[in-house]
Amino acid sequence: EGTTVTLTARPEVNWRFRHWNHNESSANPITVVLEEGNNSFGAYFEQLYTLSLASDPPAGGTILVDPPSGPYANDETVTLTAQPAAGFRFARWTGDAGGSTNPRTLSFSRANRSVTAVFEIPPPSVKSLGYETRPPFVVRFHMRLHDGDGHAISEGVTREMFSISENSQMLDYRETNQFVRPGPDLPLKVVLVLDYTASMKDAGAIDDMVVVAKSLIRAGDIDTGQPYFTATHHIGIVEFHDRPDDGFGEAMPLTRADEQGKNDLVAGVPAEDSVEHGLTRVWDAVDLAINMLRDTNRESGEVWAIVFLTDGYDTTSSTSANSIRSRAQSYDITLYPIGFGDVKPEHREAMQSMATNTGGLYSEASDAQALYEAFAQVVEELRGQWNLTYITQRNSGTVNATVTFAWQSGTTSFSKSFSASSLEGDIHQGEIDVIDRSYDEQANQTTFYLKATYVPRNISRFRFPLGQDGAAFTTQGHGGLLQGWTLNTPQSGVVELYAPGWPDDPIPLEYGSFGNIGWVTVPGDVAMLKLDYDQTVYDDLPHEKTMKLGGEYLAP
């Protein structure tokens, strides 16, 4: 009696001490004084349970546990949160937890638990921009590609990533001469709509807007050095600054984005102090941009887009936001609103709706750097445009074509039906059109743009006998069909173009290919381009090839 004793409870592995029986104390160790007679003390323990976690695949992501320390007692609850790694998304739970809810709670009920988080690489997506068929037997699909995270795929796409079946029969891309073309090689018309109103001036945003707009027009890819915009593209500029009828207007018409055109566009971006900053007519300005696109000829597969920069305030427009969205949809124009300055929630919602309903993208910027990044993101979206061309094997009847695109470990597909009966034609006759004419009053010269719309097999050189005195030919570089080709003028008025590797081992153009060739510059204001008849025949090919010349601006 009266002896002091120290008691220490020692739990086994996966057990935990709870309390003593005589006083419910959870202190450990405890000191007790023995009373007269025998003394009895009991230690209560509880069993603990383990939690095993795994990721499938292991590189797909990780699992966070709250509370993080284990093991866990009976009826204890933990919260599991699956965190995907870059390029993956969470799919579902397996094991002792099911479903796809994330985060997910898990309770222990007298058993160990094992849970696996399944991650997957999101499949890509394809937005169809239309398709075309043309003699002889050419099928072209125009599309915009996105990865599983919704980011535009602007590079790295090859023909081997596409598989095509016709009426459920898989085609060999070598037999169909299948190839893809990226955005810089494909036609695009885009109008920039810039906000010079008082609210933008008060936010100190106009100067940043001007700098970024000019930089974007000239910008190029840092890795490749190639420009974002090429002579295959057109850019226009609309500005708005006040309520009167002259408070908004066309600062620059749609201008081809060759080197001279970019110079003109940069010079055409209004300076901050060139206008009076007043009330807002943003929707009227966007409506004007829609009309600018509507009033032009749309090339096959050409994308029309409007990028407008605004804080979303509109005080005096006669056109509504809903009307803009409807008109853009009716003309298949993609809208890319960029919120800049003090963007209110209701304005943000209106611009997000415009982007969503026209297949565009809404972004927001708070400063010059963020604005440049927002513009660059829009350009990446536009560069995510691709064309897939192949030669159909069918000669008649209805063709049900299914295209499957594989990106990373995911695939997506789409189907189109067309009639092959009208595609018969001379596969040995190519076609070149004069697609555009522009007159430079200051230089007093006219420029005609040439585009190949169909190229036969084994074409590795061209010959153009120009029919006007003083005519000069320039090959389009970036975005052109003949990048890397050599230009030669063997005699006055005659232009010859040779493929890389000429003459020993030339690399011919892809069978069925298309794209801008270049432009002819002629002194004076000339309505039509004249190309003389040329009897020169290259007889070293298995079959004589001819080229059909056409277009609105070609002299008969």
Image: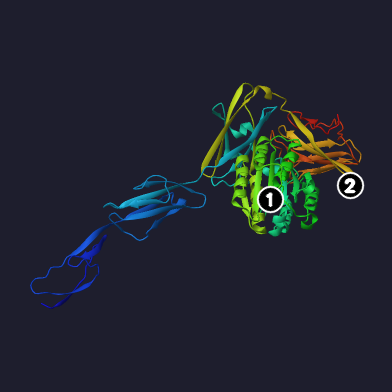
Residue situated furthest left in the rendering: 37
> In the rendered image of this protein, does residue 126 appear above or below residue 133?
below
**Front in this rendered view, residue 555 or 508:** 555
The percent coordinates of residue 230 (x first, y second) are 74, 46
Q: Is residue 161 left or right of residue 119?
A: right
The percent coordinates of residue 471 (x first, y second) are 88, 41
Q: Amino acid at mark 1?
A: Leu
Q: Is residue 163 visible?
A: yes
As helix, strand or loop, the secondary structure at mark 2 comes to loop
Residue for badge 1 = 309
Q: Residues within 10 Å of mark 1 (few under 14, many from 20)?
A: many
Asked whether disc 1 touches disc 2, contact meaning CB atoms under 8 Å apart, the reply is no
The percent coordinates of residue 52 (x first, y second) are 35, 54
Mark seen at residue 454 = none
The first of marks 1 and 2 along the sequence is 1
C-alpha distance separating marks 1 and 2: 34 Å
Q: Residues within 10 Å of mark 2 (few under 14, many from 20)?
A: few
**Front in this rendered view, residue 466 or 104:** 104
> In the rendered image of this protein, does residue 114 appear above or below residue 30?
above
> In the rendered image of this protein, does residue 208 appear above or below residue 412?
below
Q: Is residue 181 visible?
A: no
Q: Is residue 6 left or right of residue 378?
A: left
Mark seen at residue 443 = 2
Q: Amino acid at mark 2?
A: Ala
As helix, strand or loop, the secondary structure at mark 1 comes to strand
**Front in this rendered view, residue 128 or 458:** 128
Number of the front mark, 1 or 2: 1
